[in-house]
Image: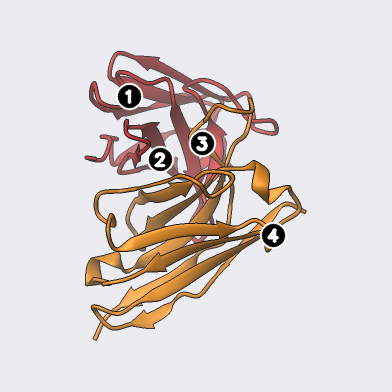
Amino acid sequence: EVQLVESGGGLVQPGGSLRLSCAASGFTFSSYWMHWVRQVPGKGLVWVSRIKRDGGWESYADSVKGRFTISRDNAKNTLYLQMNSLRAEDTAVYYCARELNVIVGTNTDAFDIWGQGTVVTVSS
Amino acid sequence: QSALTQPASVSGSPGQSITISCTGTSSDVGTYNLVSWYQQHPGKAPKLMIYEVSKRPSGVSNRFSGSKSDYTASLTISGLQAEDEADYYCCSYAGSATLVFGGGTKLTVL
């Protein structure tokens, strides 16, 4: 079964750090671009970051640039999001998502597999 | 990276058709054919319904269709069913390798 399982969420104080993990199974992880998307409960989805198949290239939303770092370990089939200098407005459910792969070498920028999400709460 | 504009809510009766709009700018929807649509039921992860403006992933009902004109993308659901009641989100490539979502639309099946 194709699956993504996030972990690492929790309660952290403003200014603190947290590392999220996303374990992939059921597919060839190294063949896919991967993304993080977040959602404040009751609010909309917000794209956070993406990383290339081999981990050699990444991009970020302006709201997290310089504070968050996306990475991956293809040997462990795991995606990460290192979150530093956390703010109250980073409180959300964080989803990892697989990018739909239709033609090798081109991006669809669509997410065909999602994890169940992990909750991050930034509060004192 | 301003959010795409969607109506907060739409409604329709079973069997009817509804359309949800998603308005962007020349920096996103107006320039790129990389618009996708997601369905999200309460407490669940989003599900991909449409990608690249009008393509359906395997397994998605042909009652769901997508289109785009100028700066506005649209999702049409025909033959509304009770299980279609959910939140719907559009998403577009926004240049510089970034993506932007819409604010979401709550679909109510009357």
What's the chain of the residue with tag 2? B
Which residue appears farthest toward the bottom when viewing the image? A124
Labels 3 and 2 share a subunit: no
User: Residue at label 4?
Assistant: A75
CA distance for labels 4 and 2: 33 Å
CA distance for labels 4 and 1: 36 Å
Quick one: SS at disc 1? loop
**Residue A40 seen in the figure:** no
Residue at left 34%, top 59%?
Answer: A42
Quick one: SS at disc 3? loop
Does A118 appear above or below B65? below
Residue at left 36%, top 65%?
Answer: A92
- Mark earlier in primary sequence (3, 4): 4
Chain A representation colour: orange
CA distance for labels 3 and 1: 14 Å
Under mark 4, the amino acid is Ala
Q: Quadrant of the N terminus of chain A?
A: bottom right
Q: Horizontally, is B5 left or right of A25 in the view?
A: left
User: Residue at label 1?
Assistant: B29
Residue A36 location (% of width, % of height): 45, 54
Chain B representation colour: red
Does B29 appear above or below A38? above
Residue B71 location (% of width, % of height): 28, 19
Under mark 1, the amino acid is Val
Does B27 appear above or below B5? above
Under mark 2, the amino acid is Tyr
CA distance for labels 3 and 4: 24 Å
The front one of B60 and B34 is: B34
Residue A19 location (% of width, % of height): 45, 72
**Residue B54 seen in the figure:** yes
Q: Which quadrant holds residue A79?
A: bottom right
